[in-house]
Amino acid sequence: MNKMIKETLWRQFGASIDMLENAIQLCPAEYWDSKNKFWYNAYHCLFWLDYYLTLKPADFSPPAPYSLSEFDPSGAMPDRTYSKGEMLSYLEHSRKKCIVLISGLTDGLANSRWINDNKNYSVFEILLYNMRHVQHHAAQLNLLLRQEINDSPKWVSVTEHKMN
């Protein structure tokens, strides 16, 4: 796959991850588990980020201490509130996973299928879908921060994290 396309994809996907990270970092402790469940919104985003970066979704298993609660059709919450540190660790896990996937993209891999019960996308398209999902939730978290503390992180144009 064209090097410029991979680098551009990473710079923008990485920027979305950075914006999510900045929102998590800015959230004050007293707001982490308030009525708006900031922590859960962050967790939901991180869970699906990790899942959509898994080339064989049927084989997905989140790292400890996380569970598959997001797959529960009844909308069950995780068994406990995850800490900010845990969320930042999960974010870093997924950032690395994203870098490995994008840096290893070939035309064949990008065109291969990512299939679960609801989606049948190319790997390239699931990456774009995933990036949009992360940015959507980063924006939600920024709105919650603006409403609660009248502050939010600044826009990230491109990630400063290198792909290689």
Image (cartoon, helix red, strand yellow):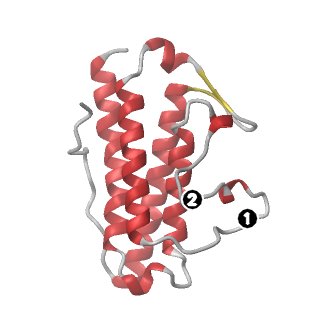
Q: Outermost residue toward the bottom?
A: 30
Q: Nearer the viewer, residue 60 or 8?
A: 60
Q: Which mark is on residue 66?
A: 2
Report, in whole angstroms, how far the alpha carbon at label 2 lies from the one at label 1. Answer: 15 Å
Q: Is residue 31 left or right of residue 72?
A: left
Q: Is residue 155 left or right of residue 90?
A: left
Amino acid under disc 2: Tyr
Residue drawn 55% across the image and 40% down it:
52
Image location of residue 84, percent across then percent down? 40, 70
Q: Secondary structure at mark 1?
A: loop
Reading the image, the residue beneath label 1 is 75
Q: Nearer the viewer, residue 68 or 138?
A: 68
> Counting other residues with Cα less than 10 Å from the Cα at mark 1, is it few (<14), some (14-19), or many (20 or more)?
few
Query: Can you say whether 89 is above or below 160 in the image?
Result: below
Q: Residue 32 lies in what quarter of the image?
A: bottom left
Mark 2 residue element: loop
Residue 72 higher or lower than 82, as above or below: above
Kindly identify the amino acid type of the residue bearing the numbered disc 1.
Gly
